[in-house]
Image (cartoon, rainbow, N blue to C red):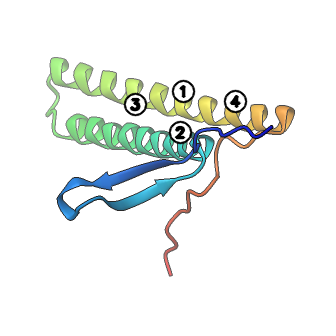
Amino acid sequence: MKVFAADPSISIVDPKSGGQKLFNITDVGMLISAAVGVLLILSALLAFFYLILGGIQWITSGGDKANMESARNKITHAVVGLIIVGAAWAMMVLVQNFLGVQIIGGTLSFPKPY
């Protein structure tokens, strides 16, 4: 007895080119892994950018209490954001090690400076 299952791959087709495949995702787990990795990187970059923005606002406040308070809040929120992103990454690494699954680091490769 033969069983014909659906193809588990996801294909993105370009309708303008007559059905040519743009890319083919063969494993949904790899897609989720890459998405989680990209989201962690983006959130860390945004928190770091927010930290720099708070520092610039602190420097340019000119001693005004309201501007200094706003800058201090930005810096505090950015540091808390970085801590949350780091904790999320650490929890994912722990889950990877305890369960033996790969959540982060599938096909996502970081650019090299050389």
Give SS at disc 1: helix
Q: Nearer the viewer, residue 58 or 105?
A: 105
Q: Nearer the viewer, residue 105 or 67?
A: 105
**Vertical position of residue 40 compared to residue 68: above or below:** below
Precedes in sequence: disc 1 or disc 4: 1
Amino acid at dot 2: Val
Precedes in sequence: disc 1 or disc 3: 3
Which residue is identified by label 1? 84
- Viewer-side label of 4, 2: 2
Residue 48 is drawn in which quadrant? top left
Amino acid at dot 3: Ala
Amino acid at dot 4: Met
Cα gap from disc 3 to disc 2, whole angstroms:
20 Å
Badges 2 and 1: C-beta atoms under 8 Å apart? no
Residue 78: mark: 3
Badges 1 and 4: C-beta atoms under 8 Å apart? no
**Vertical position of residue 76 compared to residue 38: above or below:** above
Which residue is identified by label 4? 91
For the point 64% across and 52% down, the residue is 106
- Viewer-side label of 2, 1: 2
